[in-house]
Image (cartoon, rainbow, N blue to C red):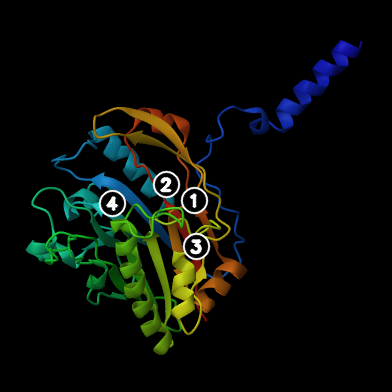
Amino acid sequence: MLLRLIIIVLLFTLMIFPQSLSKDTHSTHTTGRHLQSNQPSLLTLVSWNMQWLSVANKETFITRTTSDFTQLARILADLSPDILAFQEVDSISAIEALLPSSKYKIFLSDRLTSPNEKFAGINQFTGFAIKNGLPIDNPPDLKALNIRLHTRKDHTRQAGRLRYGSYIIVRKGMKNELHLLNIHLKSGCFSVKNKPSSRSCRTLRKQASALTTWIQQRLNNDEDYIVLGDFNHRLNSEHQWLLTSLNQKLSLPAFNLTENTDAACLARHTKRNGSRKKRLYRSLVDHALGSEKVANSIKMHGQVYQYQYATDEVDNYQLSDHCPLVISLPSLE
């Protein structure tokens, strides 16, 4: 009798809480909360480092098949962004392979037109895909993020080939315009645990200074802004220094819009020798910073979450080693 009762309780538990006992913690894609239908109209922003996305598959250890591109396109169709801020995309053709040109207009980094600041082979460009009908301005990119450091041997300057900050201004549904800066900062200096004198950390400090100048310009002009993308720094860690450095110099603080965003990105980690394995990333490096009005608007009526791949997607497709960051932004009043 007791055994029968235990079996009945177990079956009931499986029916009510099936996922709590599942070994596959990535069976669903999104972790966003359900938004009420009577809330203000939302602008969907997606930031996604697409890991060496190229239609030519040239000079890169990340190669993709037609099926891989199709799956990436399905993810974007599911998210249906009004604005996609992408990183590590080699060409307009590469991003157009994922988004219909009849629905989106592509803006690739200004670095594309600077021969001395790009590589002869594959490049990692930042940029935006904007849904048609969304009124925007396309001012010059933030070139100052392409840091030129002196070499330690002969102290001569070398041509920088780091990523620009792609810059657009959005006007739809905004009482005041919204300034968006899409960045991909120098890798290798994820927290204070990294050696401050390393080349990566020295470069990141200079990039932080350029970001400070750009954000302060927005503050001086009373302009709302979002800086989003691959910061290559763990802003949610107690060991971060980048956001602290910014806010020590700004007249008003930049708000970490991803402060409460859970990270559980299961992705395929591919080495340059071709070996690969699955890895679960529990710390965000893809972040978004915003003005106070933006932060308050999202807190009241919007959301920020990480779109997470299902396990079978990671097994079967070459997606990216970053999961998309999704921001639902209400109209700013």
x 36%, y 84%: residue = 217
Three-letter code for the amino acid on which mark 2 is drawn: Cys
Q: Earlier in the sequence, mark 1 or mark 2?
A: 1
Question: What is the crowding at mark 1: few (fewer than 14 residues within 10 Å), some, or many (at least 20)?
Answer: many
Three-letter code for the amino acid on which mark 3 is drawn: Ser
In this view, 144 is above or below 197: below
Q: Is residue 109 rendered to the left or right of residue 26?
A: left
Three-letter code for the amino acid on which mark 4 is drawn: Leu
Tell me the CA gap for discs 4 and 1: 20 Å
- Which quadrant would residue 40 be assigned to in this image? bottom right
Q: Is residue 237 rendered to the left or right of residue 200?
A: right
Q: Earlier in the sequence, mark 2 or mark 4?
A: 4
Residue 13 circle label: none
Q: Is residue 197 rendered to the left or right of residue 191?
A: left
Three-letter code for the amino acid on which mark 1 is drawn: Gln
Q: Report the label total.
A: 4
Q: Nearer the viewer, mark 2 or mark 4?
A: 2
x 42%, y 31%: residue = 278
Q: Earlier in the sequence, mark 3 or mark 4?
A: 4
Residue 328 circle label: 3
Q: Nearer the viewer, mark 4 or mark 1?
A: 1
> Where is mark 4, residue-wise?
99
Q: Earlier in the sequence, mark 4 or mark 1?
A: 4
Element marked by disc 2: loop
Q: Residue furthest bottom?
A: 221
> Where is mark 1, residue-wise?
306
Tell me the CA gap for discs 3 and 1: 12 Å
